[in-house]
Image (cartoon, rainbow, N blue to C red):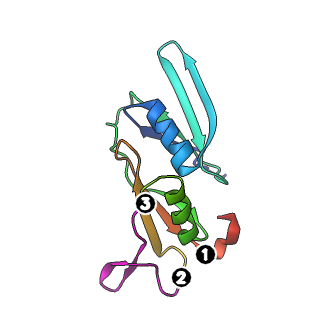
């Protein structure tokens, strides 16, 4: 039996601001924006992903409390350039060596060893991880 992760709730204080950030600055695609009285669901998906996020303003978590969700890309330098071009503020690249976290990409460009991070307007923290072996499909 396959168990697939398909939706992650992201706690935000302002759904419209978060929706604009994820669409305009990060490049996620809008799947659903539905209202029914006080209820609203906004679901967005990263390009090429089978897992989406849902922006929620009244979750059991405080806005900005989500940390460590990973987005995986084949070329982290191109991903960083795209984020900057869209107006996001990603960190510099870093990797993990013998001494722990070190600046810059992994020199051997090994899978799963080069990262960058960014926060959404509420402070929810994301990581982007490079997996070059996936080629242009990651």
Residue 74 horizontal/vertical position (percent): 61, 70
| In the image: residue 47, left or right of residue 59 | right
Question: Which residues make up the magenta segment?
Answer: 91-108
Q: Above or below — where is 89 with respect to 78?
A: above
Q: Above or below — where is 78 with respect to 87?
A: below
Residue 84 horizontal/vertical position (percent): 49, 59
Residue 109 horizontal/vertical position (percent): 53, 82
Say which residue appears at 48% left-offset and 52% top-offset. 87
Q: Separation of disc 2 and disc 1 at Cα?
A: 7 Å
Disc 2 element: loop
Q: Farthest top residue?
A: 37
Say which residue appears at 47% left-offset and 76% top-offset. 113
Disc 3 element: loop
Say which residue appears at 37% left-offset and 52% top-offset. 67
Label 2 with label 1: CB-CB less than 8 Å: yes
Query: Residue 108: which numbered mark, if any?
Result: none
Query: Residue 132: which numbered mark, if any?
Result: 1
Say which residue appears at 45% left-offset and 69% top-offset. 115
Q: Point out the tag, 2 or 3, that comes first from the N-terminus.
A: 3
> Would you say residue 56 is visible in this rendering?
no
Task: Provide the residue designation for mark 3.
Answer: 90
Disc 1 element: helix
Query: Residue 109: which numbered mark, if any?
Result: 2
Q: Separation of disc 1 and disc 3 at Cα?
A: 19 Å
Label 1 neighbour load within 10 Å: few <14, some 14-19, many 20+: some
Residue 88 horizontal/vertical position (percent): 46, 53
Q: Quadrant of residue 99?
A: bottom left
Asked whether residue 106 is drawn in magenta, I would say yes
């Amino acid at each position: 039996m396959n168990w697939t992760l398909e939706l992650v709730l992201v706690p935000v204080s302002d759904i419209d601001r978060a929706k604009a950030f994820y669409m305009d600055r990060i490049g996620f695609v809008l799947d659903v924006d539905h209202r029914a009285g006080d209820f609203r669901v906004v679901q967005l998906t990263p390009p090429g992903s089978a897992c989406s996020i849902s922006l929620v303003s009244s979750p059991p978590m405080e806005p900005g409390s989500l940390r460590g969700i990973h987005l995986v890309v084949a070329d982290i330098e191109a991903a960083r350039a795209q984020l900057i071009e869209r107006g996001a503020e990603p960190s510099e690249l870093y990797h993990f060596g013998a001494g722990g976290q070190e600046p810059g990409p992994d020199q051997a460009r090994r899978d799963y060893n080069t990262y960058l991070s960014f926060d959404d307007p509420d402070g929810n923290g994301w990581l982007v991880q490079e997996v070059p072996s996936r080629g242009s499909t990651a």
